[in-house]
Image: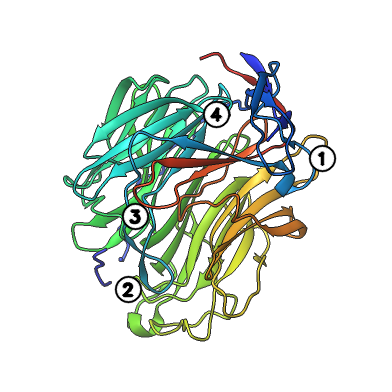
Amino acid sequence: MLSLSLLATCSSGMISGTPAGSGGSGTTGSAGTSGNAGTTGTAGTPGGAGTSAGAGTTGSAGVSGAAGTPATGGIAERLTTTDVTVPAGVKAGVRNYRIWASTMLKVAPLYTAPLANCGTLLCYTSGSASAHNARAVRLDAGDQLAAAIDLGAGLECRGIAAEPDGHFAALLWDNAADKIYVRRFDVAGVQSWSTELTNSDNHPTDFGIGESRLEFGGDRYGAYYHVHSDSGHEGDTLKFTAAATGAQTTQWTWGCSHSMSDLLSWHPQASSFLPVCVTDCYPGTGNGDFAAVSIGGIYTDNRNKVLDVDAGCNGSVAGELGGAAIAPVGWKVTFNAHQSPVTLGDSSYSTATMNQDIGFAAIAANHSVSGGVVWLTSTAGVNEADSAIARWQPEGDATEQYLVGWMEPGTAAAYKLARVGATGSFLEGPTDLAARARWGQRDDPFRVHSNRDVVWGWFDAAGATTLHFARVRSGGSAACAAF
């Protein structure tokens, strides 16, 4: 294998490499408690659909946001955005292997975690490559800045997740030392423990290849991230830290190789973490001349195949993960990949004659693939990317459905949002919301508050101090924890 350098009530209301042996299997924890969510804010004079009205008289408890857009109607009518000024500008992105090339990401990743008090945590990295700082911002129930938390100079944020009582953890990477930590904090940002995640023969040396994810469930934090082996190969590791003590356990020390794209999602009803990867080589490629026999794919648990994709065992790969949504049973995942039949070898994919479309697949509770891939786009010559997905449960509608988004490149990029059913059939849209809302690259942006609103954040460019925060209102309500 080639080495790569690489408690009040809130509602939606009216609003405006060759793999080494796998490590021992970790024990799946018991179901965790999802954080409650909702938003409480001020009412204002109603505005036109999609336009936030000015703040007015303080609304009663249980009414959220500034009036202007009712939590009814279609996606566009339910969407609101809020601008939040953060203490320091977001760090620029790095060059990362994507579709058959290494390209620059616009900004460092932004990670989102709903809180049980109806607020939201967002974690990002500020500064520059030589002088950076991991930071978290906490928004209140009205999506306004409640606190800014310094997570450490010289560290980069590589994930965030929260517990029902307001404690949260961040996955923090020290690039200079090739070390990565899970650190737990209380809601005010006071650290309770720090655990360095370690394997004996690999380290988190860079994120020019692969990704990182942190999720909470079953009284533990799951961390899934790219590692570089001492022998010069690229893979991933899946590890857990106990919420109470920070004690570390390992699901595997070496998974997909090369691990090009990753997702991790906790399902409370299944009491299970789902890891998903895109690989350019193993486990799909057999022995032989990689230039002739290489093949990549999308896998759960680094062994259950979702889809074959063209790949070169050298960083060239023709698929990328988007997001994972919790379904009533199992999960739904989105990604971009090619619909044309897969072929072998490191010259198998032609960017001149082949393109990327958005795929939708169901994953069963046991992490096996349930049915085939449904293609949400089929646009010759257009390479859709940056897909995202979340369960959508508007008040009064019991239909199993999902919000799915993706970016369509062009002179002016389009950001399409659609509602799809359980089998991927379109129920609404897609609608281009680029004039009002966008989302980031490779950061699995969509999250669901327990009042069932779907939220996400984004920065427009490196150095920006304006964090944009979007919310699609479900019309539902939730009990907001008192912390």
Image quadrant in which the N terminus is located: bottom left
Which of the two marks, 3 or 2, is nearer to us in this view?
3
Give the mark nearest the N terminus, 1 or 4. Answer: 4
The structure residue drawn at horizontal position 71% and vertical position 42%, both measured from the top left corner, is 78
Left or right of 420 on screen, residue 213: left
Q: Is residue 304 above or below residue 83?
A: below
List the residue tagged with mark 4. Answer: 32
Q: Residues within 10 Å of mark 4 (few under 14, many from 20)?
A: some
Give the mark nearest the N terminus, 3 or 2. Answer: 3
Q: x%, y% of residue 168?
A: 42, 27
Find out whether the residues at labels 3 and 2 contact each other: C-beta distance under 8 Å. no
- Which coloring applies here? rainbow
Foreground residue among 51 and 151:
51
Left or right of 202 on screen, residue 393: right
Foreground residue among 422 and 365:
422
Give the mark nearest the N terminus, 1 or 3. Answer: 3
Q: x%, y% of residue 170?
A: 37, 34
Q: Residues within 10 Å of mark 3 (few under 14, many from 20)?
A: many
Q: Is residue 423 above or below residue 52?
A: below
Q: Identify the element where label 2 is drawn.
A: loop
Which of the two marks, 1 or 2, is nearer to us in this view?
1
Q: Residues within 10 Å of mark 2 (few under 14, many from 20)?
A: some
Q: x%, y% of residue 259?
A: 38, 60
Q: Identify the element where label 1 is drawn.
A: loop
In the picture, the disc for residue 93 is 3
Give the Cα distance between marks 1 and 4.
26 Å
In the picture, the disc for residue 314 is 2
Give the Cα distance between marks 1 and 3.
40 Å
The structure residue drawn at horizontal position 34% and vertical position 83%, both measured from the top left corner, is 291
Give the Cα distance between marks 3 and 2.
22 Å
List the residue tagged with mark 1. Answer: 397
Which of the two marks, 1 or 4, is nearer to us in this view?
1
